[in-house]
Image (cartoon, coloured by chain):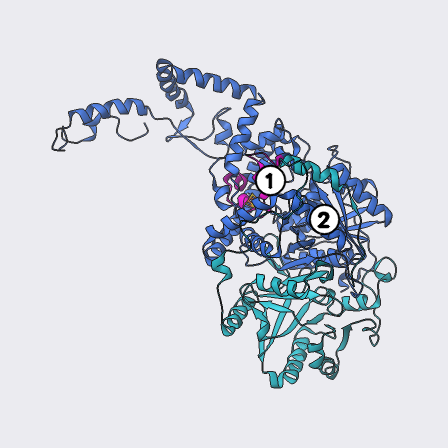
């Protein structure tokens, strides 16, 4: 190794310039709360052309890969159904499988810590770090550690936590959070990455993939070697053996779970399958749904810490099992299935909203359709986080893509319903629905409204479209055009059509010449 | 050897909560009836002939940019030795690591490497004895300098030789049951992964590899601490979707198949 002759290791604290005051992860992209910040973040995302193109390109690629892989695999629906059945069975017997899993981890010499919430998990981790006088933690990709803001707490204790997934490492230098489950730095271009590396290394970089990758590789290699603790998430725990399954394409998961003397796993309590046979199903579904690969490059199935006869591997294994709002969904007839999620990101890649605005807009660790459902549920916050349920077009594409058939679109509707029932929707929205109710309750009012809507929109329209409307229409027109309402409403046309049908002679010949004018003048045009 | 039990904390209240959310007064203690198990039947029952398994593996492995050499049992040692030297020359490699493994020992690869002036390290205690010390990438202080010499030396080997426990045809995957002489680091810290195995070790799908693993180690407490499935070279698409090969693990992967 030894590129650049750099010998001394200086774990770089993510630039500790003035804190943004967010009091969060230490690399928070912005400070506004989830719900009320949603509009602002949407506007910003819509203005960022690179971001929108990059997200659309990447999600297209991933979506295409998934469809091709599913096609090659054959009988995808049977697979999905199998995946759903296995996940649902596991979750509805989580007390059994989690108990079995934990007992096996302990029998294999690993330590298990059950943690009710994020604070418990953080303090458990801090205890472990303290006992080992840890100064440097090398992290594999772990959404759960983002969820509990672990980096921020480590930073406070003077412990450096280095993200070792290349995309995550880039984001750490930028002090940003991931914007996609699989490709976290999807929104960054090469020049931006080169700038971040320049600031880190104090020397100029060409915005060239190979140069940039080599620099990161060298830096990260030293972190792997020097780290006191390797920290990872867990893709799937296997209950029958107490094994932890980690998948990665880069191999960073293997590095952090092999080289440091202590390996700590932080996992959501639902990330289990009963047996190795079931693991085969979810690994196949995950790889194909996430990136269209047949199998992720590295799949490590880790059972206990290193055995006495081993010459490498961690000497100590800790598994932190986290609830943090998950158990609230158990037994809920509508939302329990959200725990079936295998975090493949297929739903993000097909979501028209995510594809337009990217992940940061959601303002939470979990973005896209799954984020819009999971975030309010985990945070048990319908007011702020519940607003994410509106970041959806309810088109159902997410359900179609989901390899374990989670009905995300239905759940989004239920979340909106909950919000309404709790009277947590915005005042203008409540007024709008009141008006709507009154209008639809009276034929006269309804007729009047449709007529006046046509005339009111006229000054805004060009060539049959409204390209930029005033609020609340602007919410729509900032990302697409709005077709004008037609002068003649369907109700008016219907009356004419009825009259025409009544006048039609029995033999089926047109009553009067069959020309458009005779049909009442309206025709099918918009004007 | 059976490991000592680890420590468990917070289990009871945690499990109690889960059980009550699921409508049970206590956590379930006996295994529930499972309506489904494993992969769909049509997939599980698909039987490939030995030849089809070989072909399928080769096409998947090469699609991932892996290289394949098929050799005859009778001349295996000699041919593989030559090929190994060729690969080392192609990559400018001067130091290689290999598993301590009976089948690999039988191929006398160390002798071949020596002929080519390439230092070799065998994954066993003291396996680095003959190697010249090199400077550590992280300097003389810190954690890495305190690790065993074998590990430090393996980090400086740029090629790793392994003998997979089995090979999965339909995904193009090597399955390594890492334990004892079959060190994890040999397939991890190197830039080139050189695997050798027999054609009859190729199975059709992942589930068969798991079955083999479980039949060899029926009790979890004796399972190797790491079962690694390796499907092609290390890759990343994190920089503007450009595929970067060999970011943390080996970037070039070879499969030598003895028939
Ligand atoms: S909800 Fe479904 S599609 Fe979305 S990440 Fe989870 S498993 Fe994948």
Look at the picture and state if A107 lies above or below B103: above
Inspect this view and state whether residue B118 appears: yes
Mark before the other along the chain sequence, 2 or 1: 2
Chain letter of the residue carrying label 1: A
Compare residues A175 and A407 and report the one nearer the observer: A407
Element class at badge 2: helix
Quick check: do tags 2 and 1 share a chain?
Answer: yes
| Residue A205, horizontal then vertical, whole percent | 69, 54
Q: The C terminus of chain B appears in which quarter of the rendering? A: bottom right
| Residue A524, horizontal then vertical, whole percent | 28, 31
- Colour assignment, chain B: cyan
Q: Which residues are magenta?
A: A329-356
Q: Which mark is residue A367?
A: 1
Compare residues A429 and A450 and report the one nearer the observer: A429
Compare residues B208 and A226 and report the one nearer the observer: B208
- Colour assignment, chain A: blue
- Classed neighbour count for the residue bearing mark 2: other residues with Cα under 10 Å, few (<14), some (14–19), many (≥20): many
Residue A435 within the segment the image draws in magenta: no
Residue corresponding to mark 2: A102
Residue A349 within the segment the image draws in magenta: yes
Q: Quadrant of ligand 1?
A: top right
| Residue A207, horizontal then vertical, whole percent | 64, 54
Element class at badge 1: loop
Inspect this view and state whether residue B232 appears: no
Cα distance in 3D space between marks 2 and 1? 30 Å
């Amino acid at each position: 190794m030894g590129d650049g002759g750099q010998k001394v290791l200086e774990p770089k604290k993510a630039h500790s310039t003035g804190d943004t005051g967010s009091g969060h992860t230490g690399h928070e992209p912005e400070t506004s709360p989830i719900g009320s910040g949603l509009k602002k973040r949407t506007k910003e995302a819509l203005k960022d052309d690179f971001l929108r193109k990059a997200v659309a390109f990447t999600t297209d690629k991933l979506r295409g890969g998934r469809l091709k892989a599913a096609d090659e695999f054959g009988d995808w629906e049977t697979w999905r159904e199998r995946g759903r059945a296995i996940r649902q069975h596991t979750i509805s017997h989580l007390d059994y499988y989690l108990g079995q899993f934990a007992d096996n981890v302990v029998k294999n010499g690993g330590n298990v810590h059950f943690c009710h919430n994020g604070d418990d998990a953080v303090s458990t981790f801090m205890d472990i770090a303290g006992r080992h006088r840890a100064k440097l933690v090398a992290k594999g990709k772990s959404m759960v550690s983002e969820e509990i803001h672990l980096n921020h707490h480590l930073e406070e204790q003077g412990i450096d936590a280095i993200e070792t997934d290349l995309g995550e490492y880039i984001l750490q230098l930028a002090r940003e959070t991931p914007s996609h489950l699989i490709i976290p730095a999807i929104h960054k271009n090469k020049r931006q990455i080169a700038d971040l590396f320049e600031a880190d290394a104090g020397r100029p970089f060409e915005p060239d993939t190979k140069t940039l990758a080599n620099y990161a590789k060298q830096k990260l290699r030293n972190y792997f070697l020097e780290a006191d603790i390797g920290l990872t998430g867990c893709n799937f725990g296997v209950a029958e053996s107490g094994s932890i399954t980690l998948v990665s394409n880069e191999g960073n998961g293997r590095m952090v779970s092999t080289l440091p003397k202590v390996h700590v796993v932080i996992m959501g309590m639902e990330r289990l399958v009963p047996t190795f046979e079931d693991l085969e199903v979810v690994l196949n579904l995950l790889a194909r749904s996430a990136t269209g690969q047949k199998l992720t490059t590295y799949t490590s199935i880790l059972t206990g810490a290193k055995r006495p006869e081993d010459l490498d591997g961690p000497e100590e294994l800790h598994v932190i099992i986290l609830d943090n709002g998950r158990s609230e969904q158990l037994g809920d007839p509508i939302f329990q299935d959200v725990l079936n999620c295998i975090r493949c990101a297929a739903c993000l890649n097909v979501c028209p909203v995510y594809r337009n605005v990217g992940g940061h807009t959601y303002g939470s660790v979990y973005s896209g359709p799954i984020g819009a459902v999971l975030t309010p549920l985990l945070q048990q916050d319908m007011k702020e986080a519940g607003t994410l349920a509106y970041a959806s077009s309810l088109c159902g594409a997410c359900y179609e893509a989901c390899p374990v058939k989670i009905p995300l679109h239905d759940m989004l509707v239920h979340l909106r319903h909950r919000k309404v029932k709790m009277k947590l929707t915005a005042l203008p929205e409540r007024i709008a629905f009141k008006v709507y109710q009154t209008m639809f309750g009276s034929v006269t009012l309804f007729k009047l409204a449709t007529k006046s809507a046509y005339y009111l929109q006229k000054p805004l329209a060009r060539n049959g479209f409204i390209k930029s409307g005033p609020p609340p229409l602007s919410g729509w027109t900032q990302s697409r055009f709005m077709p004008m309402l037609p002068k003649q409403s369907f109700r008016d046309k219907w009356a004419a059509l009825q009259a025409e049908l009544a006048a039609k002679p029995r033999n089926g010949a047109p009553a009067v010449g069959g020309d458009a004018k005779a049909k009442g003048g309206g025709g099918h045009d918009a004007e | 050897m059976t490991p000592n039990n680890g420590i468990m904390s917070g289990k009871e209240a945690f499990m109690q909560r889960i059980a009550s959310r699921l409508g049970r007064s206590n956590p379930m203690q006996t295994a529930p009836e499972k309506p489904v198990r494993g992969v769909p039947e049509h997939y599980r029952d698909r039987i490939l002939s030995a030849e089809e398994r070989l072909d399928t593996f080769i096409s998947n492995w090469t699609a991932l940019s892996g290289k394949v050499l098929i050799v005859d049992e009778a001349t295996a040692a000699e041919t593989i030795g030559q090929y190994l030297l060729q690969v080392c020359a192609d990559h400018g490699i001067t130091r290689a690591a290999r598993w301590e493994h009976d089948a690999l020992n039988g191929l006398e690869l160390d002798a071949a490497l020596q002929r080519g002036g390439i230092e070799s390290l065998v994954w066993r205690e003291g396996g680095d004895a003959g190697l010249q010390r090199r400077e550590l990438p992280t300097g003389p202080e810190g954690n890495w300098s305190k690790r065993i010499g074998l590990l430090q030396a393996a980090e400086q080997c740029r090629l790793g030789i392994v003998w997979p426990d089995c090979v999965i045809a339909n995904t193009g995957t090597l399955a390594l049951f890492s334990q004892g002489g079959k060190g994890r680091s040999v397939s991890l810290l190197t830039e080139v992964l050189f695997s050798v195995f027999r054609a009859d070790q190729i199975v059709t799908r992942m589930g068969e590899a798991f079955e083999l693993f479980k039949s060899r180690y029926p009790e979890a407490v004796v399972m190797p601490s790491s079962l690694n499935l390796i499907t092609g070279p290390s890759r990343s698409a994190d920089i503007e979707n450009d595929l970067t090969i060999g970011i943390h693990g080996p970037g070039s992967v070879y499969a030598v198949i003895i028939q």
